Image (cartoon, rainbow, N blue to C red):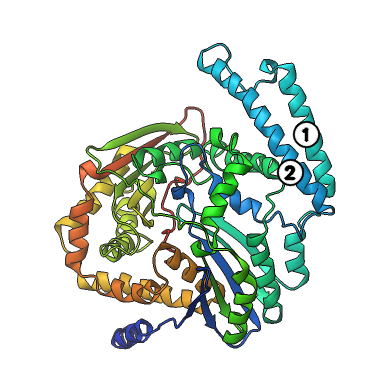
Amino acid sequence: MARRIALLLLSLPLLVASLAGQRVEVEEFTLDNGMKFLLLPREGDPNVAAGWISKFGSVNERPGVTGVAHLFEHMMFKGTRTIGSKDIERDLAIIEELDALRAEIESERAGLLEKQRRGLIDDPDDPANRSAEHNALLARFEKLIEEQHELLVKDEFSQIYTTNGGSGMNAGTSNDYTIYFINVPSNKLELWFWMESDRLADPVFREFYAERDVVREERRLRTDSTPTGKLDEQFESMFWQSSPYGWPVIGWPSDLNAITRAEAMEYFDLYYAPNNLVAALVGDFELDEVKTLARRYFGRLERGDRPPGAVRTREVEQQAEQRLIGKAETRPQASIRFHTVPDAHVDEPALIVLSALLNGRTGRLYKSLVLEQKVAVQAYAGVDGRKYDGSFMLGGVAAPGSTPEKVESALLAEIDLLGREPVGERELQKVKNQQLAGDFRKLESKFGLMVQLLTYEALGDWANINAFSDRIQAVTPEDVQRVATQYFTETNRTVALYYTKEGVGPPGRMPQGGPRPPQGGPR
């Protein structure tokens, strides 16, 4: 065993050098309308991981229309003028009638909201408070919804892909972007170009108001009905004082009740214009053929009248520690969050290495809080580098007989130690090697690589995927000590302590608020 270990240690520098030398070679080209393509041919399995990304996330919204980026994710599967309807002309006419009726309904509801503001009614959504005209409008609205439902070809968009060998079709919305992806057979690649360009060139946004209800139900299941969902949401909005990262990706309930299709289309025209989109393909294809298909299909998209600007409102410097104390149907736990740096910032690698030193069964938090002090049954740390700002979170679930305060104190002691004493070279190299091996594995999957290319590009530059591992390997003990001292200060932290509601047998679970995967793509 000793000989094996010695041989492993001798070969480790060669292994690290070999992995560090891995580079992703991407063919990049841009259409005249501004849409960028990242192409990576890989011979072998006749399959292509294909996707595209809009640089539009919840951070680009404003008060009153929060949740619209996530709503787009739903609407983009509802079909086009070509797909999804038995009678497109009647379908479009119904959509216009629904929009007009919705405006009248919202006018009636505005009167109820005014009465609520003045204390004349308690609930503006209580049917008992509605006028006869309000009820008549709602009845006409529902009748049109039913008529439209009869015209729909349910899930036709996804069925076309499925019957042609497509798999894994899905989408996702984050704070900074919205991504759409699928795996398609190589001989069906032209179908992907037609389908995806068609839903961008000719969206209908049918069932818009019904889909708002679907999103509200999703919010209820993900946030309102989970043990700590509402507390986690409050913690998030308290942490971000001025930044638009403070509102939830899924949106606030009042906004989901009121967003109109016209408002949504304004955002679509700006953020889903080709000059704000990037596509990536990884798999078995010919470069020249793909470029021809890209020009033929995506080239018909019209460039936006004006380029989307950067987010203007940034987070202000925190002046004092913030604390949230709550009770939920969960085990006692503590979360601590610090403001740090955006994705690709020069300090991000040191923070990622620092989180790796703390995380895992062999990390400092588990060893100290769980095994030695026995104040926690779970402990974690994580970096969340977003496009415009970033944070670092650590936390733990209290052991029986322990308290959130004990967990908090133990967590702070560990990060204080990192600021006072340089980490040893052996411990540091171990986490670097683990990170490097993980990065290498992510390059093996066509699908995973496609997603990474898109998310890296959405946050800045896809080429950072090649620089990332080198930046991690360059982190020194002094770098770790410096960032721990610089960012983990009392005035820069926000703390959440959760206690168990009386009479509740809580599940052993980690807070929903963290740690989340970094927004800069899979790490």
The quadrant in which residue 485 appears is bottom left
In the rendered structure, find residue 279 and report the number of the disc placed on it: none
Q: CA distance from mark 2 to mark 1?
A: 12 Å
Of 108 and 346, which appears nearest the observer? 108
Residue 151: where, in percent of width, then height?
Answer: 83, 49
Residue 263 lies, in percent from the top left, at 57, 42
Answer above or below: position of 391 versus 218. below
Q: Nearer the viewer, residue 503 or 149?
A: 149
SS state under label 2: helix
Q: Amino acid at mark 2?
A: Ile
Residue found at the very far front of the displayed protein: 305
Give the quadrant of the N terminus.
bottom left
Q: Position of residue 383 (x, y in %)?
A: 35, 57
| In the image, residue 254 above or below residue 251 | above
Seen in the image, is 177 located left or right of residue 88?
left
**In the image: residue 328, left or right of residue 399:** right
The residue depicted at 43 percent of the width and 54 percent of the height is: 516
Residue 320 vertical position relative to residue 28 in the rendered view, above or below: above
Count numbered badges in the picture. 2
Crowding around mark 2 (Cα neighbors within 10 Å: few <14, some 14 to 19, many 20+) is many
Which quadrant of the rendered structure holds the C terminus? bottom left
Horizontal relation, residue 332 to residue 339: left or right: right
Q: Which residue is mark 1?
A: 142
Task: Give the residue type at disc 1.
Answer: Glu
Residue at screen point 66% across, 39% down: 213
**SS state under label 1:** helix
Q: Which mark is residue 95?
A: 2
